Image (tube, grey):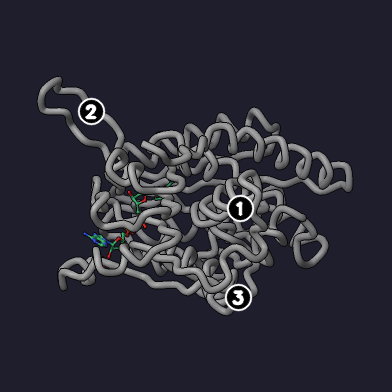
Amino acid sequence: MGADVIDGNRLAQRLRERVAEELHAVQTSGLRPGLATVLAGDDYAAHAYERHVKKLADGLECYYVSEQLPANVEIADVQATVGKLNADPRITGILVLRPLPPHIPEAEVNRSLDPLKDVEAVHPENAGLLAQGRPRFVPSTPASCFWLLDTYLEESGHDPATYYAGRTMVVVGRSDSVGKPAASLGLLRNATVITCHSRTQAAGRLAEFTGLAEILIVAAGVPRLVTGDMVSEGVIAVDVGINAVKDEATGTTRMVGDLDFESVAAKALAITPVPGGVGPITDVWLIGNAVAAAANAAWGRAPLERLSRLVHG
Ligand code: NAP
């Protein structure tokens, strides 16, 4: 196995130091960033994520509010909760945790967010700005993929400002929160971007496209979807997937990604593990987005070097 395994925990620690500095800088200027999460229902992963964000926010001394609603909540109550947070000056960033209960239309909830507090860029205005290449906010998961890629490139002697230009980037997954914004960020870096999804696989063409990737980002939520025979030698492979898989032999459950780690690592130049890859960076980015939102609201576009570098390379 020759690939560099990119250590997300180490990079998350580095990012945490950066975000702590930014938080301190905006607080010194009199701004008070605050993050709120809205959680509806009993989803295990959403609750685990909420607890994790709270711990991180507490550690960074960032104001944090958690709104929890029952699984049988009405859409009007979810929107009323979002409206209350929109109006609360202590809150600069709002995240509605997914999945929402199936009877709650996600798009309607997203539309009720104040675009200036919509740190995950799910409101149509922010999604549109990102698609047009002039994002107000960069959603935390795709941002983390590029933060990780940029840092890896820098540490291995490449210039992330030019590395992507013309290279083939394949994104597997087209969700509004991960796949589409990741593809938009790839285009912003002048990569040649191919997006694959479930119908690509149904048409029997997934390996045809993943095999073209020089940079591969997989966000499908399908355990070990991409195997070594589906990638080319020297690919840089980023695994966003988080899948709980039961080991039939031992009865234990463990997390695996969307890449078949061993076989892809045997051909890759670099690869992210699951757990310990993209995941730990995402939580820190989210807090960083609330800091950026505070700066955005007070000063116009966020003058945070971390963000402008992400967008402009
Ligand atoms: P999602 O909303 O369910 O979207 C999944 C996407 O993958 C869809 O576009 C779907 O295609 C595509 N897809 C599904 N099966 C496929 C297949 N067999 N072949 C090719 N494409 C396929 O999921 P998501 O929110 O984007 O999340 C994706 C994964 O990332 C999940 O495992 C999630 O837990 C994980 N995640 C991790 C983090 C983190 O911090 N690391 C954050 C967010 C999400 P269609 O559009 O055709 O249905």
Q: Amino acid at mark 2?
A: Thr
Q: CA distance from mark 2 to mark 1?
A: 32 Å
**In the image: residue 261, left or right of residue 77:** left
Determine whether 107 is above or below 96 in the image. Answer: below
**Numbered label attached to residue 253:** 2
Residue 286 visible in image = no
Q: Residues within 10 Å of mark 2 (few under 14, many from 20)?
A: few
Name the residue located 59 percent from the left edge and 69 percent from the top edge: 189
Tell me if label 3 and label 1 are in contact, CB under 8 Å: no
The kind of secondary structure element at disc 2 is strand
Name the residue located 43 percent from the left edge and 44 percent from the top edge: 271
Name the residue located 16 percent from the left edge and 73 percent from the top edge: 203
Name the residue located 35 percent from the left edge and 39 percent from the top edge: 45
| Residue 279 location (% of width, % of height) | 46, 41
| Residue 93 location (% of width, % of height) | 62, 53
| In the image, farthest residue toward the right | 29
Q: Name the residue that disc number 1 marks.
A: 150
